[in-house]
Image (cartoon, helix red, strand yellow):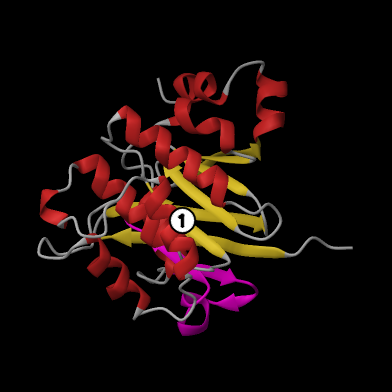
Amino acid sequence: MTEQMLVQTKNLTKRFGRVLALNDVSIEIPKGIVVGLVGPNGSGKSTFLKLLAGLVRPDSGTVLINGQKVGLKTKAQVSYQPEIDQFYDWMSVGDALDYTAGLVPDWNWEKAQELLGFLNLDQGARVKHLSKGMRARLKLAVSMSREADLYLLDEPLSGIDPPSRVRIIKSLIGGYESGRHTIILSTHEVAETEGIFERVVFLEKGRVRIDESAESIRAAHGRSIQGLFEEVYE
């Protein structure tokens, strides 16, 4: 039986002016796994996620989600968490959840309440008073409270304090249902996240450098994913 692919890109290319952000990227990702999308800043990670989310259009190549071209139908299947904050300072944590729940059809309030509790988020706290780490927790709670097929998390640990990093990683492990949801997590914070990756895609200057299972990377290269990351991008 052929494995069902959730994400399929073929010869995907994207430019921003003279900058070639992605260059002929072809990737297939099945349902139900956690993928680490790793590489230094400027390697094309954010652009790749935005293309999957339908926020930008490719210059050439194709993107399919569940066999469909990216559009309104696929956007309803994808939960995208940007690296930048998407909430207004005047909002409370509860306002941020209410706002998002009104925009998407697959919001799960039970899941949202569980995540708020686990991430130690107070619904009455104002966004403008939250630390960077607490803002990161809020973004994750909002993203993972949807019942999406695909979760795209762009640098969720970037610049975050250690306690928040631990909470974020634990919440990802706790909320992930193997075989049902797919998570693509872009990061250059490899050491702390490699334990949850089932597959790792290394991007370099917009191209795929390595695309293998986490287990085969460790076996074939005889080192951790962090160790290989340091070697590839030294």
Q: Where is residue 191 in the image (x, y as percent from the top left)?
A: 47, 25
Which residue does the image show at 70% across and 30% down from the upper left?
215
- The structure residue drawn at horizontal position 41% and vertical position 62%, both measured from the top left corner, is 80
x then y, percent, for residue 188: 39, 34
Query: Is residue 63 placed above or below 132 in the rendered structure?
Result: below
- Name the residue: 32% across, 55% down: 139
Q: Name the residue under label 1.
A: 114
Describe the element under mark 1 as helix, strand or loop.
helix
Using the rendered view, name the quadrant where residue 212 is placed: top right
**On screen, 127 above or below 158?**
below
Query: Which contiguous range is marked in magenta?
Result: 60-82
Q: Residue furthest top?
A: 222
Q: Is residue 102 above or below residue 148?
A: below
Instruction: Please name the amino acid that badge 1 sits on.
Output: Glu
Q: In which quarter of the image is residue 86?
A: bottom left
* Quadrant for the N terminus in the image: bottom right
Q: Is residue 102 magenta?
A: no
Q: Quadrant of residue 214?
A: top right
Quadrant (top left, top right, bottom left, bottom right) of the C terminus: top left
Where residue 103 sits in the image (x, y, percent)?
Answer: 35, 80
Camera-side residue of 116 and 96: 116
Residue 54 shows up from this direction: yes
**Is 213 left, or right, of 83 in this rendering?**
right
Residue 16, horizontal then vertical, whole percent: 27, 60
In the foreground, 227 or 31: 31
Q: Would you say 195 lies left or right of 162 here?
A: right
Q: Nearer the viewer, residue 154 or 132?
A: 132
**Does residue 204 show up?**
no
